[in-house]
Amino acid sequence: MPDLKLLALDTEDLDVISATTQDAVIRVGDMGFAKADHRFALLMNRFAWEEGGKTRQRKRAALHFDRVTDVKVAGIDTNAVDGVLELLTIRFAEADTPAGTVELAFAGGGTIRLAVECLEARLQDLGAAWAAKATPAHA
């Protein structure tokens, strides 16, 4: 399976990244806001949906958003660095073109909202895939 390397500069691009990262698992301690760099980044173990369900695999990947001016977290204990979150979707809502808000929604209702000057996100796989125990499913 080839490594993914994706760039999102508009909502259609972000929809691709969102679909690719759906059901990714993320340690709370593997997320952070580098305020001086205007960057929010996270490491994840994402399910390889691009394989079409033929194989159950996960890959380590990095996702970051640039031009971030503020971060708001709701429903997530940021002190529980070993806590694990399941990413459901990523959305962008324009507020004052091209600025807006990126929302990362997690299972259980937790959210992270990023105020951004414009949408700029990058996803990159970081290595080999490994077997996943199950295919994620939703009600």
Image (spheres, helix red, strand yellow):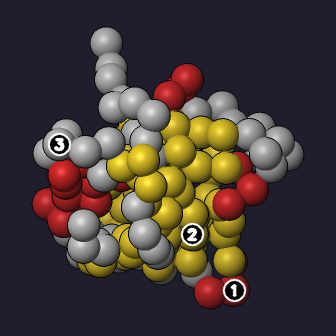
Name the spot of residue 78 as percent of width and height, x first: 77, 46
Which element carries disc 1, helix, strand or loop? helix
- Mark toward the viewer: 3 or 2: 3
- Mark toward the viewer: 3 or 1: 3
**Any mark on residue 14, and which?**
none
Q: Specify which label sits upstream in the sequence, 3 or 2.
A: 2
**Any mark on residue 41, and which?**
2
Q: Amino acid at mark 3?
A: Lys
Name the spot of residue 68 as percent of width and height, x first: 52, 73
Measuring 68% from the left and 77% from the top, which residue is drawn there? 34
Measuring 43% from the left and 42% from the top, which residue is drawn there? 132
Q: Is residue 133 above or below residue 118?
A: above
State the residue in front, 54 or 94.
54
Quarter-of-image position of residue 11 = bottom left
Q: CA distance from mark 2 to mark 1?
A: 13 Å
Which quadrant is the C terminus positioned in?
A: top left
Within 10 Å of disc 1 (Cα), the crowding (few <14, some 14-19, many 20+) is few
Which element carries disc 2, helix, strand or loop? strand
Determine if residue 121 is in view: no
Measuring 24% from the left and 73% from the top, which residue is drawn there? 2
**CB-based contact (under 8 Å), mark 3 and mark 2:** no
State the residue in front, 44 or 87.
44
- Mark toward the viewer: 2 or 1: 2
- Return the residue at label 3: 54
- Return the residue at label 1: 36
Q: Specify which label sits upstream in the sequence, 3 or 1.
A: 1
| Left or right: 77, with 112 as reference point | right
Q: CA distance from mark 3 to mark 2?
A: 30 Å
